[in-house]
Image (spheres, grey):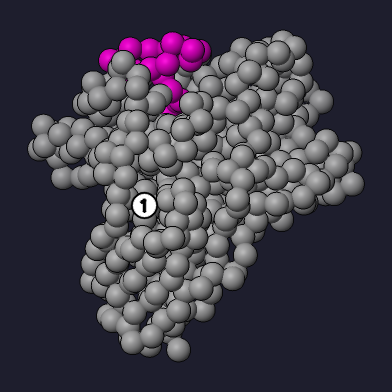
């Protein structure tokens, strides 16, 4: 069988941008078993003195997650943050309308900040602009970030947290153009409240950065016009506009499914264009950057979620069991985001534990890694530094919705300080390996130290608590000689080729 050939040139000076590590962020919402039974399960054999599962903490640390968005999501649009602070025994139980469950409020702002410290992550805090507004937003910033000597900062101190949390990144609500959202708004209604909330939040703490809500996903009828209107109102006060997108393989069309990252690429380019249009219109000096604060594969659990008993506590919701082909698309999506590191500064894989997540737990049992854990971990661990702009030539194919899909989806990250160069690559070919030749003459003395491969003959293979048949190995065949890296990337595979200086 003929092996297809692809070429790549890497130059130190062909830089896209320094990568903001927050691009490898994730998300924990008060939804399903993400919090209760996920990060927090007091009776569990692995629980610490705070009730946090240490097996989960270890896996999150393995992913090196730099920032976690919290507490939602749709949940935040009906959430009173005051319900989740102070003595736990005094906290109210609430009907949680976004997901039709009962929220016990055992975990709230301070507990979550404590957990985030344990996993070495910052928090990307969302404020409720659905049922609440400007007042609750400024009060939460004061509670979290003001040192002391004011009502809400002293309240935090009285709750046992003398030091301010110093939360830097804040989301102004969630998916406010979605009719499903509690407190759904028009673009002008949201733009105005976001502008006013942003203004006073920054008056309380001028060091914070703010994310305005973009459209809930690209196919929303509001898309583009929404972003333009919202940024027209908020341009002077915010730093980022958000993007949300989920994909699924409902038609069981693998060629089309693996090409969906091209749609993601187009979505990112579109939002950059809109942000730049508003900058031009305002004669502005600053760029509005992007926060892709919800992205993943999500479709496996849709039917199961229709059968959940209303008002139960932490039922299993959105528990997609990911297969091998999902891991390949997640790899392609990560590569796509790295290609836009100049403008895409924050991203949150939604979500982190149990809910459309790389980490799953059994109640009172073990934690285990889903297939998507691996590409996410590899990029987070090895993708720190400068995102390079490789020159790639690859054979292409056409699918139902896409033309000229390259078989090779690839990018590279250069870490000058650690003298490391990493190539991330997906071979989309269904039947054939891809012979890759990569010119690295500019990186004198760099040699291949490891070629990690994630491959499996069964596209539908999943992992479970019983075992991880979809797991990477380090037996890839990449070699380096005379300023060239050569490798055969197996059919349908995720590859990490790691190089270091002699």
Q: Residue furthest front?
A: 1
Tally the marks.
1
Q: Is residue 416 visible?
A: yes
Residue 5 at x, y percent in the picture: 33, 63
Residue 72 is covered by the magenta coloring: no
Tell me which corner region of the image, top left, top right, bottom left or bottom right, holds residue 64.
Answer: bottom right
* Pointer 1 local density, CA inside 10 Å: few below 14, some 14–19, many at least 20: many
Q: Position of residue 402 (x, y in %)?
A: 30, 36
For the residue labelled by badge 1, is the local secondary structure a helix, a strand or a loop? Answer: loop
Write down the residue under mark 1. 407
**Is residue 193 placed above or below 45 in the rendered structure?**
above
The residue at the point 36 percent across, 48 percent down is 336
In the visual, does 397 lie left or right of 451?
A: left
Residue range highlighted in magenta: 169-192
**Residue at the (57%, 57%) spot, across then down:** 454
Seen in the picture, residue 456 relative to 280 is either above or below; the reply is below
Give percent across and percent down for residue 324. 59, 45
Seen in the image, is 452 located left or right of residue 470?
Answer: left
- Report the residue at 38% width, 17% height from top: 177
Left or right, 277 with respect to 325, comes to left
User: Which one is nearer the viewer's eye here, 460 or 473?
Assistant: 460
């Amino acid at each position: 069988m003929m092996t297809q050939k692809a070429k790549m040139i890497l130059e130190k000076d062909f830089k896209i941008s320094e990568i903001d590590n927050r691009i490898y962020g994730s998300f924990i919402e008060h939804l399903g078993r993400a919090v209760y039974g996920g990060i927090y399960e007091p009776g569990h054999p692995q629980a610490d003195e705070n009730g946090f599962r240490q097996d989960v903490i270890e896996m999150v640390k393995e992913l090196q997650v730099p920032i976690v968005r919290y507490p939602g999501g749709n949940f935040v649009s009906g959430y009173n943050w005051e319900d989740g602070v102070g003595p736990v025994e005094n906290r109210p139980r609430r009907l949680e309308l976004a997901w039709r469950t009962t929220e016990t409020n055992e975990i709230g702002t301070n507990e979550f900040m404590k957990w985030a410290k344990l996993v070495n992550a910052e928090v990307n805090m969302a404020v409720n602009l659905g049922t609440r507004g400007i007042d609750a937003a400024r009060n939460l910033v004061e509670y979290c970030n003001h040192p002391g000597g004011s009502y809400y900062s002293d309240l935090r101190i009285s709750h046992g947290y003398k030091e301010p949390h110093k939360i830097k990144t804040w989301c102004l609500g969630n998916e406010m153009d979605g009719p499903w959202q509690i407190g759904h708004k028009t673009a002008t209604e949201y733009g105005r409240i976001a502008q006013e909330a942003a203004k006073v939040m920054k008056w309380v703490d001028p060091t914070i950065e703010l994310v305005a809500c973009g459209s809930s996903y690209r196919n929303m009828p509001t898309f583009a016009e929404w972003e333009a209107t919202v940024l027209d109102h908020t341009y002077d006060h915010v730093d980022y506009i958000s993007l949300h997108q989920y994909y699924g393989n409902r038609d069981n069309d693998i060629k089309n499914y693996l090409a969906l990252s091209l749609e993601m690429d187009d979505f990112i380019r579109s939002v950059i264009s809109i942000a730049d249009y508003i900058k031009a219109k305002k004669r502005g000096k600053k760029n509005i950057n992007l926060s892709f604060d919800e992205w993943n594969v999500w479709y496996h659990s849709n039917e199961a979620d229709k059968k959940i008993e209303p008002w139960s506590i932490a039922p299993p919701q959105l528990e997609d069991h990911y297969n091998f082909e999902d891991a390949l698309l997640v790899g392609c999506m990560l590569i796509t985001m790295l290609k836009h590191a100049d403008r895409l500064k924050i991203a949150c894989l939604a979500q982190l534990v149990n809910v459309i997540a790389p980490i799953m737990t059994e109640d009172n049992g073990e934690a285990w890694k889903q297939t998507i854990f691996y590409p996410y971990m590899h990029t987070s661990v090895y993708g720190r530094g400068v995102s390079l702009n490789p020159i790639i030539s690859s054979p292409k194919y056409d699918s139902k919705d896409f033309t000229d899909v390259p078989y090779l989806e690839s990018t590279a990250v250069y870490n000058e300080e650690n003298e490391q160069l990493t190539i991330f690559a997906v071979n989309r070919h269904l039947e054939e390996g891809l012979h890759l030749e990569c010119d690295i003459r500019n990186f004198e003395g760099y040699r291949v130290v490891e070629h990690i491969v994630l491959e499996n003959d069964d596209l539908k293979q999943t992992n479970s608590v019983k075992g991880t048949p979809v797991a990477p190995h380090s037996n890839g065949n990449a070699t380096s000689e005379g300023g060239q890296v050569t490798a055969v990337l197996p059919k349908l595979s995720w590859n990490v080729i790691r190089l270091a200086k002699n």
